[in-house]
Image (tube, rainbow, N blue to C red):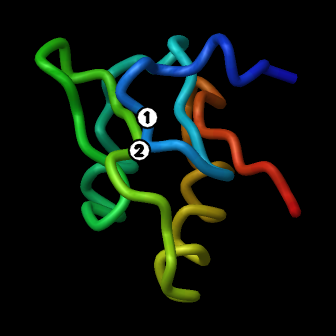
Amino acid sequence: MTKPDAAHPHNAPGRVFVDLTCVECTLCVRACPNVFSKDARAKAYVHTQPTEETDLAVVEACTRICPSNSIKLHKD
């Protein structure tokens, strides 16, 4: 499991984070722009932690479709 210290430095603090293995596919950014954004190198990061159940459901889906398995969701 990836540790939060390997996370993208722009991630908003919280349960969801993107690590530095991101391959710049931007699937998560397109699927859930309320939560994910991309930096100047097109690497994804979490700009806002999900608060709505619908965003959380999309984030959970993104953890499954991420080709580099870079999106992590820590369960409470």
Earlier-in-chain disc, 2 versus 1: 1
Q: Residue at x 43, y 34 (%)?
A: 11
Q: Quadrant of the C terminus?
A: bottom right
Q: Is residue 37 above or below residue 42?
A: below
| Quadrant where the image shows the N terminus | top right
The residue drawn where x is 25% and y is 61% is 33
Which residue is most to the left? 40
Indicate the amino acid at tag 2: Val
63 and 38: which is toward the camera: 38
Residue 19 in picture, x, y percent from top left: 57, 22
Q: Which residue is mark 2?
A: 46
Q: Is residue 37 above or below residue 76?
A: above
Residue 49 percent across, percent down from the top left: 48, 60
Q: Is residue 22 left or right of residue 31?
A: right
Q: Tag 2, which secondary structure?
A: strand
Query: Residue at left 59%, top 28%?
Result: 70
Residue under numbered circle 1 = 11
Label at residue 60 = none
SS at mark 1? Answer: loop
Left or right of 41, for residue 25: right
Residue 73 percent location from the top left of the image: 72, 50
Spot occupied by residue 17 in the image (x, y as percentages of width and height): 57, 39
